[in-house]
Image (cartoon, coloured by chain):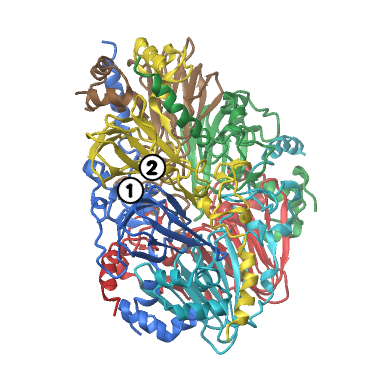
Chain colours: A cyan, B green, C red, D brown, E yellow, F blue
Amino acid sequence: MIFPILFTFFLLLSSSNAAVQDFCVADLAAPEGPAGFSCKKPASVKVNDFVFSGLGIAGNTSNIIKAAVTPAFAAQFPGVNGLGISIARLDLAVGGVVPFHTHPGASEVLIVAEGTICAGFVASDNTPYLQTLEKGDIMVFPQGLLHFQVNGGEAPALAFASFGSASPGLQILDFALFKNDLATQLITQTTFLDAAQIKKLKGALGGTN
Amino acid sequence: MIFPILFTFFLLLSSSNAAVQDFCVADLAAPEGPAGFSCKKPASVKVNDFVFSGLGIAGNTSNIIKAAVTPAFAAQFPGVNGLGISIARLDLAVGGVVPFHTHPGASEVLIVAEGTICAGFVASDNTPYLQTLEKGDIMVFPQGLLHFQVNGGEAPALAFASFGSASPGLQILDFALFKNDLATQLITQTTFLDAAQIKKLKGALGGTN
Amino acid sequence: MIFPILFTFFLLLSSSNAAVQDFCVADLAAPEGPAGFSCKKPASVKVNDFVFSGLGIAGNTSNIIKAAVTPAFAAQFPGVNGLGISIARLDLAVGGVVPFHTHPGASEVLIVAEGTICAGFVASDNTPYLQTLEKGDIMVFPQGLLHFQVNGGEAPALAFASFGSASPGLQILDFALFKNDLATQLITQTTFLDAAQIKKLKGALGGTN
Amino acid sequence: MIFPILFTFFLLLSSSNAAVQDFCVADLAAPEGPAGFSCKKPASVKVNDFVFSGLGIAGNTSNIIKAAVTPAFAAQFPGVNGLGISIARLDLAVGGVVPFHTHPGASEVLIVAEGTICAGFVASDNTPYLQTLEKGDIMVFPQGLLHFQVNGGEAPALAFASFGSASPGLQILDFALFKNDLATQLITQTTFLDAAQIKKLKGALGGTN
Amino acid sequence: MIFPILFTFFLLLSSSNAAVQDFCVADLAAPEGPAGFSCKKPASVKVNDFVFSGLGIAGNTSNIIKAAVTPAFAAQFPGVNGLGISIARLDLAVGGVVPFHTHPGASEVLIVAEGTICAGFVASDNTPYLQTLEKGDIMVFPQGLLHFQVNGGEAPALAFASFGSASPGLQILDFALFKNDLATQLITQTTFLDAAQIKKLKGALGGTN
Amino acid sequence: MIFPILFTFFLLLSSSNAAVQDFCVADLAAPEGPAGFSCKKPASVKVNDFVFSGLGIAGNTSNIIKAAVTPAFAAQFPGVNGLGISIARLDLAVGGVVPFHTHPGASEVLIVAEGTICAGFVASDNTPYLQTLEKGDIMVFPQGLLHFQVNGGEAPALAFASFGSASPGLQILDFALFKNDLATQLITQTTFLDAAQIKKLKGALGGTN
């Protein structure tokens, strides 16, 4: 009985709230800026923008590294755009490996959901930090540092990697060096690797020159 | 006599300065991103973009909470877009209340311009911090924590709330719980409130289910 | 043969790198600042600072909400200090509930590892976004907004919540309102709840006044 | 009846929350860092840390500029430390002036509480933005740009300036140039002001050389 | 022999990487936001976006201050957009001066490449920090503080100024005060300079009123 | 004549300004936090804290890579602490190389002061961006991406690298992989390099296992 005016009163306030930026669901078709994708119009935002089912499906590990990474970054999961967080699924078959890589834009916390994973990163003073992680263990990889994950057990492993950015980036060392047309001589000069080694890996990964 | 060339020289520099981003007045019709609204073209920026007169007018407190909040966030006051600050006017008639609410995106400093206001917030260890504020007193409400303001005196009160964001957001507890179609049973489950209490408030605030 | 001087050369460079701030493992005994805890001395950093096993153990859900939250924030997991990320384990027995709460300092991504979870958040325009999540599904809860999780299935559920901050905070609505000495009359005034309802919940949660 | 275990359960969680950083009240005696002052120990935080009464007292405008600025920055108002916001009181007697100045660390929103204030800033393309502000009007001064306030009326004026930083800084142009021992010749060289003008102002402000 | 599947496997991953935001080359024709310019489409990014040759050419110092500043900010050098860094070239003929100015949006490190430069800044407590810099010396000017550079030698000087922002801004004190239509009386009021002095400099710099 | 009271008035204000955080010169002996080193007490700050002469001296390039990097990061140049910028000197003798490396914490702009430098970075889609830079040319390397510099001419080269952080970090690829005790087998697994290649480089760089 005493509340009817309250309802009316706050309608005005609420309408001015319409522009309040609780979230900024990515509109992949609109211009992108340094802080992320443009926002979808509020009227077209649906609960599905905030939910992603792609990580429920095991990645295909029938490949040479016996591993698969399935990202849910802003480009795949538009609800995280601008919110400073994202996640990825990691499947490692027996013997599977995610080779040395970096995330230029965020630190990572890995949580092992199934199996055993040997993981490590190297600090910029060249100290390696290595650990064998069992189910439920977590490990943090500081932003931008080289790190890797290896299935260290006799069964498939499953893990989830969380990132402190909606677009953490991913640079895989072998691909950056060998899966393009960088001249072998230049790679030799800048990595001290032998030309034969470089050519072998270029061949395997589809690089040229 | 000695200065004429100076004028010419710096014209070039100044023209390159045209792109320097002193400010980014909101263009509400252009795409919005995680960092705020797009900027108006510099040529169309006027002093009125940086000035707002809407806070000079008392809000209408003829409502059940005997209170009115008038925001000057980026959506109402485009000059603050991207500058990390905004402000709102708070009118509290005798007996007026701004019920428990949060600002998800910024901390708030409240300054009492007229009257007496009892204000408080609750920290995440559940400690309440309460104070009766007189004219000229200020109080800070840390980002995201539940807080309220109540007119504690015999006369109308006026206050201004400053925020460390151009779009601080505003989530009013009662509205979030009762002014929508959330099922009563779900609210009972997630708040421990009795169904009768929930239905009573839904009725008052226009909620359903 | 050609490399011996390289080793010598970079020693100098590496020693200057010693101060490079790859990470800042929390020293809980040293002063804390707005950006987080002070850093442990580099010489005392060990791999165990970056690994946490506490999330491998199921929380005790033998309580009224049939739920348990186990955090790995900077205070429990010092390796994430300053890195803008943290994680928590969520156990929900059949019928378990994490009641309405907010994280003032970060957005959250929830990933369901076992079972079915009904989750939802309310935007500041009071729109609820609800979804039933199956194993492998993820959902994002934007920073500072009220949200909840309920076991929606016939079996225990397990989930991991990632946060875009090393100290995301956690404010549980019922505790903020009822588990302290806030006067019942003040709560009535600022929530519109009936005094009897408030006293009932204060009694259950240990609040007074 | 059904709640007693809830209380027990959350005690554990709450104790781990003790380290959650809702706020960071400045401990002025502990080390300061780039993000602000160290935090007081949680146990010694009181509501008075979040409240400041100094702005309720009119500043003394019996001086040559007929103006007074009373800051409530982190150094005076420790509760705002780390929260990205602060405030100051501005008293302007009839004819009072706050001369050209900048805030290196934050944008400002000025709200006129009494009287009339002529305010302005100059953009980096040298365009001035000037406005006469009446009671209740607000104006924003973008970070780092030169701006001023002048009492434009026949009565004392009162205003409050909000800043998007707990330590916005304040550099007053005349003081930076004339209230120190910078050599007159160097000032001439770097400002094109006449030596006589410089010496006159140095004399007035206590500068030397 | 063992690698062919690796190539196939990562193609999928790489294509999802296409949206990873390594960089955001400025598209000057698209909407600008608070965080910088919109990004060029990845397909149109070329190495030339990341390289700028304009700083290899000496600026024309045949002007009254015998100095030239050539910026490589995001507006001139689109590759730095969103990356938090930019640079400018500074040429100072014998007797050349860069008069007092501020950068509202970034701190600066100056490195002397040729000649001798007397540089200084004034802190907000009015303390001047002055130094004569020789070739190879560097000096830092904290964000937003007034500073200057003067050729202190018998030969032309060359320096490079680095900034911790892609759009640091530049406000030249004399231009802000005298190279526009600010009323002389208002400048007198807000700077304490004599009207004759103001009119003299307005005349030299092209200001009016 | 008219100014004497002004002097007195602002003394009060200035004293409150003493806590304004214009800068935060690193106190390397005090606790370090995620945002950088603790600040020196204002009273002990000297102009020399803001000036660094170490970059005026050529690094010793009598080593296998014929190159030397001399950093002026916060650890060497305390004045930049907290200011989001730093710089380093790069000397490259004829044939000199700075091998592939990353800066986890900042983007870099390189300016060539003498000679010719071939520089390049690899984006996370594995596209290389390469350029031969002449004197005065600049190139930007986005944060966290692998990049290198090679003297591409017949004379020594000199360059300065600016960073958008006071502590950008530096991880040299070869050192991270080969200059520590990472097991050869683990490196093989995570880089696909042959064991013989790894052992050869470990031998050269002082690595073991």
Residue wearing tag 1: F80
Residue wearing tag 2: E107
Q: Are marks 2 and 1 in contact (CB under 8 Å)?
A: yes
Which residue is farthest front? Answer: F154
Amino acid on which the number 1 mark rests in the picture: Val
Q: Residue at x 51, y 65 (%)?
A: A103
| Residue in front for this viewpoint, D133 or B32 | B32
Tell me the quarter of the picture where residue D48 sits.
Answer: top left
Image location of residue F116, percent across then percent down = 38, 55
Q: How many marks?
A: 2
Whole-angstrom CA distance, mark 2 to mark 1, is: 9 Å
Image location of residue C160, percent across then percent down = 59, 69
Tell me the quarter of the picture where residue E6 sits.
Answer: bottom right
Can residue F35 be seen at all in this image of the molecule?
yes
Q: Which chain is indicated by disc 1? A: F
Image location of residue F136, percent across then percent down = 39, 47
Q: Residues within 10 Å of mark 1 (few under 14, many from 20)?
A: many
Image location of residue E158, percent across then percent down = 32, 40
